[in-house]
Amino acid sequence: MQQIRLLCFAGSIRSGSLNQRLAGAMAKELSLLEMDVTFLSLTDYPLPLFNADDEKDKGLPENAVKLARMIAAHDGIFIASPEHNGSVTPLLKNTLDWISRVPVQARGPFSGPVYAIGAASPGKLGGMRSLAHLRDILTALGALTIPEQISVSAAHEAFDAKGSLKDDRDAAFLSACARNLVHLGQRKKPLEWT
Ligand SMILES: Cc1cc2nc3c(=O)[nH]c(=O)nc-3n(C[C@H](O)[C@H](O)[C@H](O)COP(=O)(O)O)c2cc1C
């Protein structure tokens, strides 16, 4: 199987974040498929709240440029985001907004890789409502997001000590998501063609 580069991150920087655990579980799943996987924490890429005046006066923050370049250099991206009042977190939206301001050449952070999305919540709906919003945002940005997605309800009880999903159905959704991310990531325009 052709090895591709995949990047997993969460839309939460909370210590003990359930979505970071979900992103970690996906990273593990992708590693089992013998892919080259990077796990990124947005803690390491702090960004100010987007303000067009600041962008005009100070230019783009270095972290926005770094993130845009790093994402564009991967073939597949998995984002696990918490649901905040039915939508994505302000952290994730702010990050995506900044990245969208970075000028791109041939291969951009949204036009280049294939995306997959997930959500984990202690609630019963597993962050499902936020996934529809995240899919719309990524579509607006020109990204291709695979139809498979994962939402983990009662997520505070969903992971075992090794960070794997305990429930067979959750694990099956994660696996389907991982396999199609790899499948389409391998078929999208390879890095060396751009
Ligand atoms: C402002 C706020 C709004 C929230 N809204 C929702 C919601 O709409 N649906 C939901 O399932 N959980 C909601 N939650 C609970 C989060 O899903 C929960 O805190 C989750 O653990 C956060 O993700 P994390 O563990 O990855 O940090 C909300 C939490 C906060 C702080």
Image: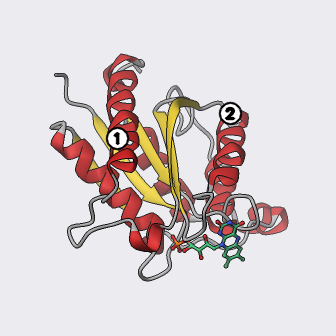
Report the amino acid beneath label 1.
Answer: Ala
- Asked if ligand 1 lies within 8 A of label 2, the reply is no
Identified at 60% across, 70% down, the residue is 47
Identified at 68% across, 37% down, the residue is 141
Q: Indicate which disc, 2 or 1, sits on the residue closer to the N terminus.
A: 2
Q: Position of residue 159 (x, y in %)?
A: 33, 66
Identified at 38% across, 27% down, the residue is 180
- Asked if ligand 1 lies within 8 A of label 1, the reply is no
The alpha-carbon separation of the residues under discs 2 and 1 comes to 25 Å
Q: How many marks?
A: 2
Q: Position of residue 124 (x, y in %)?
A: 60, 63
Viewer-side label of 2, 1 = 1
Q: Quadrant of residue 25?
A: bottom left
Q: Position of residue 105 (x, y in %)?
A: 55, 31
Report the amino acid beneath label 2.
Answer: Thr
Q: Residues within 10 Å of mark 2 (few under 14, many from 20)?
A: few
Q: Position of residue 54 (x, y in %)?
A: 77, 69
What element does badge 1 sit on?
helix
4 up-or-down from 159: above or below: above
In which quadrant will I find the C terminus? top left
Identified at 68% across, 33% down, the residue is 139
Residue 139 has which mark? 2
What residue did someone put label 1 on? 172
Nearest the eye: 138 or 68: 138
Nearest the eye: 68 or 165: 165
What element does badge 2 sit on?
helix
Query: In this rendering, does residue 116 appear at all?
Result: yes
